[in-house]
Amino acid sequence: MASASAEALELKAEGNSAIASKDWKTAVDFYTRAIELDPNQALFYSNRAQAHIRMEAYGAAIEDAAKAIEIDPASVKAYYRRAISNVALLKYKEALKDFKTVCKKAPNDKDARLRMNECEKLIRKIEFLKAIEQSDPPSAAEGLDLDSMVVEREYDGIRLEKEMTQEFIDDMIERFKNGKKIHRKYAYQIILKAKEIFYAEPTMPEVTVPNGNKMTICGDTHGQYFDLLEIFRRNGFPTETHAYLFNGDFVDRGSWSTEIAFLLFSYKWLFPNNFYINRGNHETDDMNRVYGFEGECKAKYNERTFKLFSETFSALPLATLVGSKYLVLHGGLFSNDKVNLDDIRKLNRHLKKQPGQEGLMMEMLWTDPQPDPGRRPSKRGVGQQFGPDVTKSFCERNGLDAIIRSHEVRMGGYEVEHDGRCITVFSAPNYVDTSGNKGAYINVGSDYELEHNIFDAVEHPPIKAMAYAQNSLMSM
Protein backbone atom coordinates (compact mmCIF):
# COMPACT_ATOMS: atom_id res chain seq x y z
CA MET A 1 0.00 0.00 0.00
CA ALA A 2 2.80 2.35 0.90
CA SER A 3 4.54 1.73 -2.42
CA ALA A 4 1.28 2.34 -4.34
CA SER A 5 0.80 5.65 -2.50
CA ALA A 6 4.38 6.65 -3.21
CA GLU A 7 3.99 5.79 -6.89
CA ALA A 8 0.76 7.78 -6.99
CA LEU A 9 2.56 10.82 -5.58
CA GLU A 10 5.25 10.44 -8.26
CA LEU A 11 2.54 10.35 -10.95
CA LYS A 12 0.94 13.44 -9.42
CA ALA A 13 4.29 15.21 -9.64
CA GLU A 14 4.54 14.19 -13.31
CA GLY A 15 1.06 15.61 -13.83
CA ASN A 16 2.11 18.87 -12.20
CA SER A 17 5.09 19.06 -14.56
CA ALA A 18 2.79 18.49 -17.54
CA ILE A 19 0.53 21.31 -16.29
CA ALA A 20 3.56 23.60 -16.09
CA SER A 21 4.40 22.64 -19.69
CA LYS A 22 0.79 23.32 -20.77
CA ASP A 23 0.42 19.69 -21.81
CA TRP A 24 -3.07 19.33 -20.40
CA LYS A 25 -3.92 15.94 -21.91
CA THR A 26 -0.76 14.34 -20.52
CA ALA A 27 -1.50 15.91 -17.15
CA VAL A 28 -4.97 14.32 -17.13
CA ASP A 29 -3.40 10.95 -17.96
CA PHE A 30 -0.90 11.18 -15.07
CA TYR A 31 -3.54 12.28 -12.55
CA THR A 32 -5.85 9.49 -13.72
CA ARG A 33 -3.14 6.90 -13.14
CA ALA A 34 -2.45 8.40 -9.71
CA ILE A 35 -6.15 8.15 -8.85
CA GLU A 36 -6.24 4.52 -9.93
CA LEU A 37 -3.45 3.76 -7.43
CA ASP A 38 -4.79 5.95 -4.61
CA PRO A 39 -8.42 7.06 -5.12
CA ASN A 40 -8.72 8.82 -1.76
CA GLN A 41 -6.52 11.86 -2.38
CA ALA A 42 -8.58 15.02 -2.93
CA LEU A 43 -5.62 16.83 -4.47
CA PHE A 44 -5.41 14.34 -7.36
CA TYR A 45 -9.01 15.10 -8.37
CA SER A 46 -8.60 18.83 -7.82
CA ASN A 47 -5.47 18.95 -9.97
CA ARG A 48 -7.13 16.91 -12.70
CA ALA A 49 -10.04 19.36 -12.57
CA GLN A 50 -7.59 22.17 -13.36
CA ALA A 51 -6.27 20.28 -16.39
CA HIS A 52 -9.84 19.69 -17.56
CA ILE A 53 -10.55 23.41 -17.22
CA ARG A 54 -7.61 24.22 -19.45
CA MET A 55 -9.00 21.74 -22.02
CA GLU A 56 -12.44 23.37 -21.70
CA ALA A 57 -13.83 20.05 -20.42
CA TYR A 58 -15.87 21.87 -17.80
CA GLY A 59 -18.29 19.04 -17.12
CA ALA A 60 -15.41 16.71 -16.28
CA ALA A 61 -13.83 19.44 -14.13
CA ILE A 62 -17.04 19.80 -12.12
CA GLU A 63 -17.16 16.04 -11.50
CA ASP A 64 -13.55 15.98 -10.31
CA ALA A 65 -13.95 19.03 -8.11
CA ALA A 66 -17.06 17.55 -6.53
CA LYS A 67 -15.19 14.32 -5.79
CA ALA A 68 -12.33 16.30 -4.21
CA ILE A 69 -14.84 18.15 -2.01
CA GLU A 70 -16.46 14.85 -1.02
CA ILE A 71 -13.08 13.53 0.13
CA ASP A 72 -11.92 16.80 1.69
CA PRO A 73 -14.64 19.40 2.38
CA ALA A 74 -11.88 21.90 3.25
CA SER A 75 -10.39 21.82 -0.28
CA VAL A 76 -10.60 25.50 -1.23
CA LYS A 77 -9.08 24.91 -4.68
CA ALA A 78 -11.77 22.35 -5.50
CA TYR A 79 -14.59 24.79 -4.66
CA TYR A 80 -12.83 27.48 -6.69
CA ARG A 81 -12.35 25.23 -9.73
CA ARG A 82 -15.94 24.03 -9.62
CA ALA A 83 -17.05 27.67 -9.51
CA ILE A 84 -14.90 28.60 -12.51
CA SER A 85 -16.27 25.61 -14.46
CA ASN A 86 -19.86 26.56 -13.69
CA VAL A 87 -19.17 30.11 -14.86
CA ALA A 88 -17.84 28.71 -18.13
CA LEU A 89 -21.10 26.77 -18.52
CA LEU A 90 -23.06 29.97 -17.72
CA LYS A 91 -24.39 28.43 -14.49
CA TYR A 92 -23.80 31.53 -12.41
CA LYS A 93 -25.96 30.71 -9.41
CA GLU A 94 -24.14 27.39 -8.86
CA ALA A 95 -20.83 29.22 -9.27
CA LEU A 96 -21.83 31.89 -6.76
CA LYS A 97 -22.43 29.27 -4.06
CA ASP A 98 -18.87 27.97 -4.44
CA PHE A 99 -17.32 31.45 -4.61
CA LYS A 100 -19.06 32.27 -1.34
CA THR A 101 -17.66 29.09 0.20
CA VAL A 102 -14.14 30.00 -0.96
CA CYS A 103 -14.49 33.49 0.54
CA LYS A 104 -15.70 32.01 3.81
CA LYS A 105 -12.86 29.50 4.00
CA ALA A 106 -10.21 31.90 2.66
CA PRO A 107 -11.37 35.40 3.68
CA ASN A 108 -8.12 37.04 2.51
CA ASP A 109 -8.41 35.70 -1.05
CA LYS A 110 -8.99 38.96 -2.95
CA ASP A 111 -9.27 37.21 -6.32
CA ALA A 112 -12.09 34.95 -5.11
CA ARG A 113 -13.93 37.90 -3.58
CA LEU A 114 -13.62 39.86 -6.83
CA ARG A 115 -15.04 36.95 -8.79
CA MET A 116 -17.85 36.46 -6.27
CA ASN A 117 -18.82 40.12 -6.66
CA GLU A 118 -18.66 39.91 -10.44
CA CYS A 119 -20.81 36.78 -10.37
CA GLU A 120 -23.43 38.53 -8.26
CA LYS A 121 -23.46 41.48 -10.68
CA LEU A 122 -23.86 39.17 -13.67
CA ILE A 123 -26.78 37.34 -12.06
CA ARG A 124 -28.51 40.66 -11.37
CA LYS A 125 -27.89 41.79 -14.95
CA ILE A 126 -29.31 38.58 -16.43
CA GLU A 127 -32.38 38.76 -14.21
CA PHE A 128 -32.89 42.39 -15.26
CA LEU A 129 -32.59 41.49 -18.96
CA LYS A 130 -35.10 38.67 -18.53
CA ALA A 131 -37.51 41.03 -16.81
CA ILE A 132 -37.50 43.48 -19.73
CA GLU A 133 -37.20 40.85 -22.46
CA GLN A 134 -39.72 41.02 -25.29
CA SER A 135 -40.90 37.86 -27.02
CA ASP A 136 -40.34 39.38 -30.45
CA PRO A 137 -38.26 42.54 -30.02
CA PRO A 138 -37.89 45.00 -32.90
CA SER A 139 -34.72 44.80 -34.95
CA ALA A 140 -31.79 46.94 -33.88
CA ALA A 141 -31.91 48.28 -37.44
CA GLU A 142 -35.30 49.89 -36.80
CA GLY A 143 -34.99 53.64 -37.14
CA LEU A 144 -31.50 53.38 -38.61
CA ASP A 145 -31.23 55.71 -41.63
CA LEU A 146 -27.91 54.96 -43.30
CA ASP A 147 -28.50 57.47 -46.09
CA SER A 148 -28.61 60.33 -43.59
CA MET A 149 -25.42 59.26 -41.80
CA VAL A 150 -22.48 61.46 -42.74
CA VAL A 151 -18.92 60.20 -43.03
CA GLU A 152 -16.82 63.13 -41.84
CA ARG A 153 -14.21 64.69 -44.14
CA GLU A 154 -11.43 63.79 -41.74
CA TYR A 155 -12.17 60.06 -42.04
CA ASP A 156 -8.96 58.84 -43.65
CA GLY A 157 -10.15 55.51 -45.06
CA ILE A 158 -11.47 54.37 -48.42
CA ARG A 159 -15.15 55.23 -48.84
CA LEU A 160 -17.79 52.50 -49.10
CA GLU A 161 -20.64 53.25 -51.46
CA LYS A 162 -23.51 50.91 -52.38
CA GLU A 163 -21.37 47.86 -53.20
CA MET A 164 -18.40 46.22 -51.51
CA THR A 165 -15.05 46.60 -53.30
CA GLN A 166 -11.70 44.90 -53.01
CA GLU A 167 -10.18 48.34 -52.54
CA PHE A 168 -12.29 48.92 -49.43
CA ILE A 169 -11.35 45.50 -48.01
CA ASP A 170 -7.64 46.04 -48.63
CA ASP A 171 -7.80 49.40 -46.88
CA MET A 172 -9.83 47.94 -44.00
CA ILE A 173 -7.26 45.18 -43.47
CA GLU A 174 -4.52 47.77 -43.06
CA ARG A 175 -6.66 49.99 -40.83
CA PHE A 176 -7.29 47.11 -38.48
CA LYS A 177 -3.60 46.16 -38.45
CA ASN A 178 -2.83 49.71 -37.36
CA GLY A 179 -5.41 49.75 -34.58
CA LYS A 180 -7.93 51.89 -36.46
CA LYS A 181 -11.68 51.31 -36.82
CA ILE A 182 -14.02 51.69 -39.76
CA HIS A 183 -16.68 54.38 -39.71
CA ARG A 184 -19.85 53.51 -37.84
CA LYS A 185 -21.93 53.94 -41.01
CA TYR A 186 -19.79 51.35 -42.79
CA ALA A 187 -19.99 49.01 -39.81
CA TYR A 188 -23.80 49.09 -39.96
CA GLN A 189 -23.77 48.76 -43.74
CA ILE A 190 -21.59 45.65 -43.69
CA ILE A 191 -23.54 43.88 -40.95
CA LEU A 192 -26.93 44.59 -42.50
CA LYS A 193 -25.85 43.43 -45.96
CA ALA A 194 -24.33 40.25 -44.50
CA LYS A 195 -27.55 39.56 -42.59
CA GLU A 196 -29.55 39.91 -45.81
CA ILE A 197 -27.29 37.46 -47.65
CA PHE A 198 -27.10 34.89 -44.83
CA TYR A 199 -30.84 35.00 -44.19
CA ALA A 200 -31.53 34.04 -47.81
CA GLU A 201 -29.17 31.06 -47.69
CA PRO A 202 -30.41 27.59 -46.75
CA THR A 203 -29.59 26.11 -43.34
CA MET A 204 -27.08 23.89 -45.17
CA PRO A 205 -25.64 25.43 -48.35
CA GLU A 206 -24.52 22.76 -50.81
CA VAL A 207 -21.40 23.79 -52.71
CA THR A 208 -19.00 22.37 -55.27
CA VAL A 209 -15.40 23.11 -56.23
CA PRO A 210 -15.20 23.64 -60.02
CA ASN A 211 -12.18 22.55 -62.08
CA GLY A 212 -9.25 24.89 -61.52
CA ASN A 213 -10.70 26.27 -58.29
CA LYS A 214 -10.05 25.44 -54.66
CA MET A 215 -11.79 25.85 -51.32
CA THR A 216 -10.12 26.43 -47.96
CA ILE A 217 -11.87 25.26 -44.79
CA CYS A 218 -10.89 27.05 -41.57
CA GLY A 219 -11.86 26.22 -38.00
CA ASP A 220 -12.15 28.48 -34.96
CA THR A 221 -10.28 31.78 -35.27
CA HIS A 222 -11.63 33.31 -32.01
CA GLY A 223 -10.74 36.95 -32.53
CA GLN A 224 -7.10 36.21 -33.45
CA TYR A 225 -7.03 38.67 -36.34
CA PHE A 226 -3.31 38.59 -37.00
CA ASP A 227 -3.34 34.80 -37.21
CA LEU A 228 -6.23 35.01 -39.70
CA LEU A 229 -4.11 37.32 -41.85
CA GLU A 230 -1.32 34.75 -41.63
CA ILE A 231 -3.66 32.16 -43.18
CA PHE A 232 -4.39 34.54 -46.04
CA ARG A 233 -0.70 35.43 -46.42
CA ARG A 234 0.34 31.79 -46.63
CA ASN A 235 -2.61 30.40 -48.52
CA GLY A 236 -3.94 33.27 -50.61
CA PHE A 237 -6.73 35.76 -50.10
CA PRO A 238 -10.31 34.95 -51.19
CA THR A 239 -10.97 35.40 -54.91
CA GLU A 240 -13.56 34.32 -57.47
CA THR A 241 -11.67 31.03 -57.87
CA HIS A 242 -10.48 30.53 -54.28
CA ALA A 243 -13.42 29.95 -51.97
CA TYR A 244 -13.24 30.00 -48.18
CA LEU A 245 -15.45 28.33 -45.59
CA PHE A 246 -15.14 29.47 -41.96
CA ASN A 247 -16.58 26.89 -39.61
CA GLY A 248 -17.80 29.06 -36.73
CA ASP A 249 -16.33 30.55 -33.56
CA PHE A 250 -14.70 33.52 -35.25
CA VAL A 251 -15.50 35.79 -32.28
CA ASP A 252 -14.91 35.79 -28.49
CA ARG A 253 -11.77 35.25 -26.40
CA GLY A 254 -9.34 36.95 -28.77
CA SER A 255 -9.38 40.75 -28.68
CA TRP A 256 -9.84 41.45 -32.40
CA SER A 257 -13.20 39.77 -32.85
CA THR A 258 -14.91 42.78 -34.44
CA GLU A 259 -12.05 43.05 -36.93
CA ILE A 260 -12.48 39.41 -37.96
CA ALA A 261 -16.27 39.68 -38.16
CA PHE A 262 -16.14 42.79 -40.35
CA LEU A 263 -13.52 41.25 -42.62
CA LEU A 264 -15.38 37.94 -43.06
CA PHE A 265 -18.71 39.70 -43.61
CA SER A 266 -17.12 42.04 -46.17
CA TYR A 267 -15.75 39.07 -48.11
CA LYS A 268 -19.21 37.48 -47.96
CA TRP A 269 -20.64 40.63 -49.51
CA LEU A 270 -17.91 40.75 -52.19
CA PHE A 271 -18.12 37.02 -53.02
CA PRO A 272 -21.60 35.92 -51.91
CA ASN A 273 -21.42 32.65 -53.85
CA ASN A 274 -17.79 31.83 -53.07
CA PHE A 275 -17.36 32.64 -49.37
CA TYR A 276 -19.17 30.74 -46.63
CA ILE A 277 -19.55 31.00 -42.86
CA ASN A 278 -21.12 28.46 -40.52
CA ARG A 279 -22.42 29.36 -37.09
CA GLY A 280 -20.45 28.19 -34.05
CA ASN A 281 -21.44 27.94 -30.41
CA HIS A 282 -19.75 31.31 -29.80
CA GLU A 283 -21.95 33.13 -32.31
CA THR A 284 -24.59 33.25 -29.57
CA ASP A 285 -25.71 35.90 -27.10
CA ASP A 286 -24.93 34.07 -23.86
CA MET A 287 -21.37 33.21 -24.90
CA ASN A 288 -20.74 36.73 -26.26
CA ARG A 289 -21.82 38.17 -22.93
CA VAL A 290 -19.13 36.26 -21.02
CA TYR A 291 -16.28 35.75 -23.47
CA GLY A 292 -15.71 39.27 -24.71
CA PHE A 293 -17.49 39.99 -27.99
CA GLU A 294 -20.32 42.06 -26.51
CA GLY A 295 -17.84 44.11 -24.50
CA GLU A 296 -15.58 44.57 -27.50
CA CYS A 297 -18.45 45.83 -29.68
CA LYS A 298 -19.44 48.36 -27.03
CA ALA A 299 -15.84 49.48 -26.48
CA LYS A 300 -14.96 49.91 -30.16
CA TYR A 301 -18.37 50.86 -31.60
CA ASN A 302 -21.62 50.81 -29.58
CA GLU A 303 -24.39 48.60 -28.22
CA ARG A 304 -26.38 48.76 -31.43
CA THR A 305 -23.43 47.25 -33.29
CA PHE A 306 -23.53 44.22 -31.00
CA LYS A 307 -27.28 43.83 -31.38
CA LEU A 308 -26.98 43.93 -35.17
CA PHE A 309 -24.22 41.33 -35.04
CA SER A 310 -26.43 39.18 -32.78
CA GLU A 311 -29.27 39.28 -35.32
CA THR A 312 -26.84 38.39 -38.09
CA PHE A 313 -25.29 35.50 -36.15
CA SER A 314 -28.73 33.93 -35.77
CA ALA A 315 -29.11 34.09 -39.57
CA LEU A 316 -25.88 32.14 -40.21
CA PRO A 317 -26.16 28.67 -41.79
CA LEU A 318 -25.53 25.75 -39.44
CA ALA A 319 -23.60 23.52 -41.85
CA THR A 320 -22.20 23.37 -45.37
CA LEU A 321 -22.16 20.31 -47.65
CA VAL A 322 -19.04 20.29 -49.81
CA GLY A 323 -19.20 18.27 -53.03
CA SER A 324 -21.76 15.87 -51.48
CA LYS A 325 -18.74 14.30 -49.77
CA TYR A 326 -18.03 16.34 -46.64
CA LEU A 327 -20.49 17.68 -44.09
CA VAL A 328 -18.83 20.70 -42.48
CA LEU A 329 -20.37 21.82 -39.19
CA HIS A 330 -18.98 23.37 -36.04
CA GLY A 331 -19.66 20.74 -33.40
CA GLY A 332 -20.63 17.28 -34.52
CA LEU A 333 -23.25 14.57 -34.84
CA PHE A 334 -26.54 13.82 -33.22
CA SER A 335 -28.10 11.94 -30.31
CA ASN A 336 -30.55 10.22 -32.67
CA ASP A 337 -29.36 7.79 -35.35
CA LYS A 338 -32.38 8.64 -37.51
CA VAL A 339 -31.15 12.19 -38.19
CA ASN A 340 -29.92 12.62 -41.77
CA LEU A 341 -29.02 15.40 -44.19
CA ASP A 342 -32.65 15.99 -45.11
CA ASP A 343 -33.39 16.82 -41.47
CA ILE A 344 -30.70 19.52 -41.62
CA ARG A 345 -32.09 20.81 -44.90
CA LYS A 346 -35.58 21.08 -43.39
CA LEU A 347 -34.43 22.74 -40.15
CA ASN A 348 -35.80 26.30 -40.01
CA ARG A 349 -33.06 28.04 -38.06
CA HIS A 350 -34.94 31.37 -38.21
CA LEU A 351 -37.59 30.13 -35.77
CA LYS A 352 -35.08 29.73 -32.94
CA LYS A 353 -32.46 32.45 -32.74
CA GLN A 354 -30.42 30.93 -29.90
CA PRO A 355 -29.50 27.22 -29.76
CA GLY A 356 -30.72 26.48 -26.24
CA GLN A 357 -29.82 23.33 -24.29
CA GLU A 358 -31.26 20.63 -26.57
CA GLY A 359 -32.28 19.89 -30.14
CA LEU A 360 -30.56 19.64 -33.52
CA MET A 361 -29.16 23.17 -33.51
CA MET A 362 -27.54 22.73 -30.10
CA GLU A 363 -26.01 19.39 -31.12
CA MET A 364 -24.65 20.78 -34.39
CA LEU A 365 -22.87 23.55 -32.46
CA TRP A 366 -21.73 21.68 -29.34
CA THR A 367 -21.06 17.93 -29.71
CA ASP A 368 -17.60 16.32 -29.76
CA PRO A 369 -16.11 13.03 -30.98
CA GLN A 370 -14.83 10.35 -28.61
CA PRO A 371 -12.60 7.30 -29.30
CA ASP A 372 -15.01 4.80 -27.75
CA PRO A 373 -18.12 3.47 -29.51
CA GLY A 374 -21.54 4.81 -28.66
CA ARG A 375 -22.46 8.07 -26.98
CA ARG A 376 -22.05 9.64 -23.58
CA PRO A 377 -22.65 13.05 -21.96
CA SER A 378 -20.02 15.56 -23.03
CA LYS A 379 -17.01 16.27 -20.85
CA ARG A 380 -17.82 19.94 -21.56
CA GLY A 381 -21.02 19.76 -19.55
CA VAL A 382 -23.14 20.70 -22.59
CA GLY A 383 -24.30 18.28 -25.26
CA GLN A 384 -22.81 14.85 -25.84
CA GLN A 385 -19.92 12.90 -27.35
CA PHE A 386 -20.23 10.46 -30.25
CA GLY A 387 -18.08 7.47 -31.14
CA PRO A 388 -16.64 6.08 -34.39
CA ASP A 389 -19.64 3.77 -34.88
CA VAL A 390 -21.97 6.79 -34.83
CA THR A 391 -19.82 8.59 -37.40
CA LYS A 392 -19.56 5.51 -39.65
CA SER A 393 -23.30 4.97 -39.61
CA PHE A 394 -24.07 8.63 -40.36
CA CYS A 395 -21.58 8.80 -43.24
CA GLU A 396 -22.78 5.55 -44.79
CA ARG A 397 -26.47 6.49 -44.53
CA ASN A 398 -25.82 9.87 -46.15
CA GLY A 399 -23.22 8.89 -48.74
CA LEU A 400 -20.47 11.00 -47.14
CA ASP A 401 -16.73 10.48 -47.04
CA ALA A 402 -16.36 12.32 -43.72
CA ILE A 403 -17.56 15.07 -41.45
CA ILE A 404 -15.29 18.07 -40.93
CA ARG A 405 -15.77 19.89 -37.63
CA SER A 406 -13.95 22.34 -35.35
CA HIS A 407 -14.90 23.37 -31.80
CA GLU A 408 -11.87 21.84 -30.02
CA VAL A 409 -8.20 22.77 -29.72
CA ARG A 410 -5.93 20.26 -31.40
CA MET A 411 -2.27 20.64 -30.48
CA GLY A 412 -1.22 19.75 -34.01
CA GLY A 413 -3.84 22.08 -35.51
CA TYR A 414 -5.99 19.25 -36.83
CA GLU A 415 -6.77 15.61 -36.13
CA VAL A 416 -8.17 12.78 -38.24
CA GLU A 417 -10.25 10.35 -36.16
CA HIS A 418 -12.88 7.65 -36.49
CA ASP A 419 -11.06 5.75 -39.25
CA GLY A 420 -10.71 8.93 -41.31
CA ARG A 421 -14.41 9.83 -41.16
CA CYS A 422 -14.14 12.63 -38.57
CA ILE A 423 -11.70 15.49 -39.09
CA THR A 424 -11.22 18.32 -36.60
CA VAL A 425 -9.63 21.57 -37.82
CA PHE A 426 -8.75 24.41 -35.44
CA SER A 427 -7.35 27.67 -36.84
CA ALA A 428 -6.41 29.67 -33.72
CA PRO A 429 -2.72 28.88 -33.01
CA ASN A 430 -1.46 29.43 -29.47
CA TYR A 431 -5.11 29.73 -28.47
CA VAL A 432 -5.75 32.64 -26.07
CA ASP A 433 -1.98 33.24 -26.03
CA THR A 434 -1.39 30.29 -23.69
CA SER A 435 -2.09 26.91 -25.32
CA GLY A 436 0.98 26.50 -27.51
CA ASN A 437 -0.98 24.67 -30.22
CA LYS A 438 -0.53 24.88 -33.99
CA GLY A 439 -3.23 26.28 -36.22
CA ALA A 440 -4.51 24.47 -39.31
CA TYR A 441 -6.65 24.83 -42.42
CA ILE A 442 -7.74 22.37 -45.11
CA ASN A 443 -7.52 22.94 -48.86
CA VAL A 444 -9.98 21.10 -51.10
CA GLY A 445 -9.47 20.88 -54.86
CA SER A 446 -11.91 19.95 -57.60
CA ASP A 447 -10.95 16.29 -57.00
CA TYR A 448 -12.16 16.68 -53.38
CA GLU A 449 -8.90 15.41 -51.94
CA LEU A 450 -8.05 17.04 -48.60
CA GLU A 451 -4.74 18.83 -48.05
CA HIS A 452 -4.04 19.64 -44.40
CA ASN A 453 -1.83 22.65 -43.64
CA ILE A 454 -0.46 23.76 -40.27
CA PHE A 455 0.98 27.09 -39.18
CA ASP A 456 2.31 28.88 -36.11
CA ALA A 457 0.95 31.92 -34.32
CA VAL A 458 2.35 35.30 -35.32
CA GLU A 459 3.05 38.30 -33.13
CA HIS A 460 0.26 40.68 -32.34
CA PRO A 461 -0.01 44.02 -30.50
CA PRO A 462 0.23 43.75 -26.70
CA ILE A 463 -3.47 43.32 -25.96
CA LYS A 464 -4.30 40.22 -23.96
CA ALA A 465 -7.00 37.72 -24.83
CA MET A 466 -10.31 38.38 -23.05
CA ALA A 467 -9.39 42.08 -22.77
CA TYR A 468 -12.98 43.09 -23.53
CA ALA A 469 -14.78 40.61 -21.32
CA GLN A 470 -17.28 42.55 -19.25
CA ASN A 471 -16.21 40.85 -16.07
CA SER A 472 -13.14 39.17 -14.64
CA LEU A 473 -14.79 35.80 -14.13
CA MET A 474 -13.18 34.08 -17.08
CA SER A 475 -9.80 35.85 -17.13
CA MET A 476 -8.21 32.79 -15.54
Image (cartoon, rainbow, N blue to C red):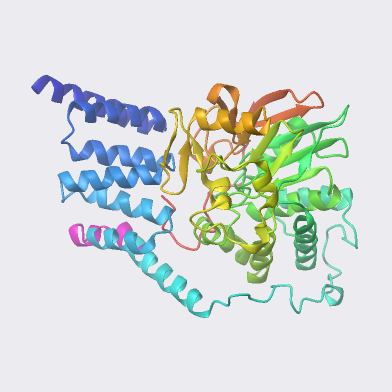
* Residue at x 70% of width, y 60% of height: 312
Magenta span has 462?
A: no
Q: Position of residue 425 (x, y in %)?
A: 61, 33
Q: Which is more toward the observer, 379 or 119?
A: 379
Magenta span has 105?
A: yes
Magenta residue span: 102-114
Q: Is residue 78 left or right of residue 299?
A: left
Height in image: 104 above or below 413?
below
| Residue 35 placement: quadrant | top left
Q: Is residue 223 left or right of residue 149?
A: left
Q: Position of residue 80 (x, y in %)?
A: 29, 52
| Residue 372 placement: quadrant | top left
Q: Position of residue 332 (x, y in %)?
A: 56, 40
Q: Which is more toward the observer, 326 or 159?
A: 326
Q: Is residue 35 left or right of residue 316?
A: left
Height in image: 413 above or below 303?
above
* Residue at x 52% of width, y 38% of height: 408
Residue 305 in sight here? yes
Height in image: 169 above or below 196?
above
* Residue at x 42% of width, y 33% of height: 22
Residue 281 in sight here? no
Q: Is residue 112 left or right of residue 333?
A: left
Quadrant containing the N terminus in the rendered view: top left
| Residue 342 placement: quadrant | top right
Q: Which is more toward the observer, 458 or 67?
A: 67
* Residue at x 24% of width, y 57% of height: 102
Q: In this view, which residue lies farthest toward the top?
A: 3
Height in image: 77 above or below 208?
below
